[in-house]
Structure formats: C-alpha cells, structure tokens
C-alpha cells in the first residue's frame, strides 16, 4: 500500500520566509495563489502585460509582475500556465534567473517527463499535482476541506526538496485529503489516461452518445438531459461518498441488474480501446500529436470544441439549469 501523507505528516516550515511565484492565474493558478496566501505563505503572481488574468489577480490583492521579474524575485517558481506555453516561458523568462537557490515546481509532469523543459542539475524540481479542477482546489480549501494531490521529486539538489513539496501540498490544502508520492512519469501517464479515457473524454462521450441515442429515437431532449447528464452527478456523488457498492445500495434492483449486465457489454468493448490509448500515451505519441497540433495553431482542437459547444445538449442544459439556481451559484471565472 502507498504511504499517504496527511496534515500531521507535513510542516509549512520550509516555505516560511520564502517567496512563491505563481506563473499563470487561471484554474490552478488562482487556487494555489489564494490557498498559499491564506496558509501564511508569501505569494507573487507572474503574468504578461497583456494577460486577461491580470485584472483578477490584482483585484485579489496580489503583486503582479511580468513572468521574468516574478521568477527573479521568487525562491519557488510554480508553473501554472497552460502546459503548451511552459517551455517558451521557461526558456525566455525563468532559465536566465536560475541558480541553486531556486526551486522549480509543476502541477503536471508533461514538460519534464517529455523533456520539453530540461532544468539545470543544481536546482530542486518538484511537482504537486492536485487530483481535481483548480476551482474545486479553492472552494474546498475555503470550506476547510481539500483536494488530494500527488507529489514527485525530479531533482533534489538541496536535500530538502521533498519537505518543500509536502509543505506546498499542505499549504494548498491537499494534505487534508491525502497526498501520495509518485514519479513525474507515473503522474503524467496516469493523468493523461484518466482525463482522456475516464474523467473527461470517457464521461462526455458516454453522455453525448446516450443523449443522442434517446433524442434520435424521438424522446424529448429535456428528458434525455435529465437521464444522461443531470442524474449522472447524483449517481457519481453516491459513488464518491460510498463507493460503487454504496451507490448500488441506493438504486433499484432493476437498475442494478441493468447496470451489471449491460455495463458488462460496455466494459468489454471499451477496455481494449483503453489499453491502446494507454500505449499511445506511454510511447509519447499523444504528446507528439499535442505539441504538433499547437505548432499548427490548434485547428483540430478548436473545430472539435466548437462543434461540441453547438451541441443540442448544451442549449437544453442551459435552460434547465437556469431553473435550478443552486447549481450555478458560483461563477467559473
Ligand atoms: N485545470 C486543472 O484543474 C488542472 C491543471 N493542472 C495543470 O496546471 C497547469 C495550469 O493549468 P490550468 O490551471 O488549467 O491553466 P489555465 O488555462 O486555467 O490558466 C492559464 C493561466 O496562464 C496564463 N498564461 C498564459 N500564457 C502565459 C504566459 N506566457 N506567461 C504567464 N502566464 C500565462 C493565462 O493568462 P490569460 O488569462 O492571459 O490567458 C492564465 O492565467 C498545467 O500544467 C495543467 O496541466 C493540473 C491539475 C488540474
Ligand atoms: C481531469 C482533468 C485534469 O487532469 C484535472 C482537473 O485533474 C486537468 O488536467 O485539468
């Protein structure tokens, strides 16, 4: 069994008196910056002059610098910009300021694992990768809860890198929920696999296929929405709280029988595809494709996102959610 680190296993001491530069103020950036500050750590934010996020970071009370100035001023430099722009930011704004007193930090292992960033040997490099969206990292921290995280050490030049990583994980609230030590390779490969085949790609494909099957068969789109999207959250809430067996305790026997028999058919079809998908990730094929797609200006990515934004399920959902204001109480900024 993996060792799981909780609040009592970590101290904030390694970060006290240090300055953390958060590069990027998006989903993870705003959450890390605010949680670290609320935990008593000095935080500055690094954003380009023309960044859309500057207004929010400034309104939240942070000193905002251009990324190279933030990197110069900081002891710990956390990369929370999109993965695709990190190599250029590293080369142009961070590398010129690196010496053995600096620590590089990441929330995902992509650029280190796939060698898009190669730091000098004398700097510490760690990862704290929250296992949840940034907005939840903030909202749960505010409620006294936490999102679990993985920590990994790529380089321990100082001999204290793991203590710094655990301190960082504690400061963003992750040790409230549980922190596991991993490698950059394991985090990168499992994270890409999870988001592609289960959490994002897998779930949205199931929702869309289910919704379209019902609507194309003549059922009302609103009924299909409640069945295939809205209720999914309620079922997943039960799985999250009580496990799969616990969820099955709450559903009817008819549902349970359909679940285990028809679910088995999906399982048999999907598992070989998942194995192929994992190999694609392990061989670096997905990473190569994603880097090239960015170099080409994201034509496929943008077209597919646009197609899905126009899907009937989005229009139906917007109307139905409007009548349940508790669902969208918190704005996604
Ligand atoms: N989203 C998530 O929940 C998770 C993300 N991660 C990892 O966290 C990291 C950040 O991802 P995420 O929070 O999704 O990113 P977002 O896309 O939400 O935010 C990116 C931020 O970086 C800013 N930015 C863009 N270009 C630059 C630049 N050249 N210099 C400085 N800042 C820049 C953006 O500013 P502007 O407003 O101007 O665009 C924005 O503030 C990634 O490594 C990702 O893999 C890990 C776990 C979960
Ligand atoms: C599931 C998507 C994720 O991996 C995450 C929120 O953990 C991401 O990179 O955004």
Image (spheres, rainbow, N blue to C red):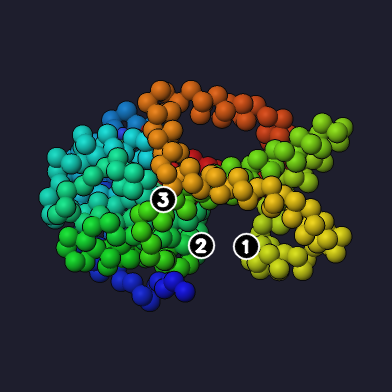
Residue for badge 1: 240
Would residue 79 be seen by someone viewing this image from the given angle?
Answer: no
Question: Image quadrant of ligand 1?
Answer: top left
225 in relation to 103, above or below: above
Please say whether residue 251 is visible from this viewpoint: yes
The quarter of the picture where residue 151 lies is bottom left
* For discs 2 and 1, the disc positioned in front in the rendered view: 1
The local crowd at label 1, few if under 14, some if 14 to 19, many if 20 or more residues have their Cα within 10 Å, is: few
Q: CA distance from mark 1 to mark 3?
A: 23 Å
Q: Is residue 242 left or right of residue 259?
A: left
Characterize the local packing of mark 2: few (<14), some (14-19) or many (20 or more) Cα atoms within 10 angstroms.
few
Mark 2 → mark 1, Cα distance in angstroms:
18 Å
* CB contact under 8 Å: marks 3 and 2: no
Look at the picture and state if 304 lies above or below 7.
above
Q: Which residue is mark 3?
A: 188
Based on the displayed image, in which of its 4 quarters is residue 176 positioned? Answer: bottom left
**Residue in front for this viewpoint, 326 or 249:** 249
Q: Residue at x 62, y 62 (%)?
A: 240
Point 35% across, 54% down: residue: 184
Give the residue number, with chain letter if any, for mark 2.
143
How many marks on residues?
Answer: 3
Q: Position of residue 169 (x, y in %)?
A: 36, 62
Q: Is residue 157 above or below residue 312?
A: below
């Amino acid at each position: 069994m993996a060792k799981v680190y909780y609040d009592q296993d970590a101290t904030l001491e390694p970060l006290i008196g240090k300055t953390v530069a958060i590069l990027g103020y998006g989903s993870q950036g705003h959450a890390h910056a605010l949680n670290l500050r609320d935990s008593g750590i000095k935080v500055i934010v690094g954003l380009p002059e023309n960044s859309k996020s500057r207004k929010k970071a400034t309104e939240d009370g942070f000193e905002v610098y251009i990324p190279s100035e933030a990197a110069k001023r900081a002891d710990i430099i956390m990369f929370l910009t999109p993965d695709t722009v990190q190599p250029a930011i590293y080369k142009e704004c961070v590398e010129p300021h690196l010496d053995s007193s600096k620590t590089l930090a990441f929330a995902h292992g992509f650029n280190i694992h796939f060698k898009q960033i190669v730091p000098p040997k004398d700097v510490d490099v760690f990862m704290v990768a929250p296992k949840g969206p940034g907005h939840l990292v903030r909202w749960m921290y505010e409620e006294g809860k936490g999102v679990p995280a993985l920590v990994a050490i790529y380089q321990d030049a100082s001999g204290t890198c793991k203590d710094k990583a655990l301190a960082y994980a504690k400061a963003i609230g992750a040790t409230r929920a549980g922190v596991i030590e991993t490698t950059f390779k394991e985090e990168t490969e499992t994270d890409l696999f999870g988001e592609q085949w289960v959490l994002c790609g897998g779930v949205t494909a199931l929702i869309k296929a289910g919704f379209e099957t019902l609507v194309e068969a003549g059922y009302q789109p609103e009924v299909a929405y409640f069945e295939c999207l809205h209720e999914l959250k309620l079922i997943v809430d039960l799985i999250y709280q009580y496990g799969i067996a616990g969820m099955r305790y709450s559903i009817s026997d008819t549902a349970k029988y359909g679940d285990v028999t028809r679910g088995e058919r999906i399982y048999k079809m999907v598992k070989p595809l998942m194995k192929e998908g994992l190999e694609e990730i392990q061989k670096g094929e997905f990473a190569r494709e994603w880097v090239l797609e960015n170099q080409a200006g994201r034509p496929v990515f943008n077209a597919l996102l646009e197609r899905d934004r126009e899907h009937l399920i989005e229009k139906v959902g917007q109307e139905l959610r409007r009548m349940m204001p508790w669902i969208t109480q918190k704005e996604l900024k």
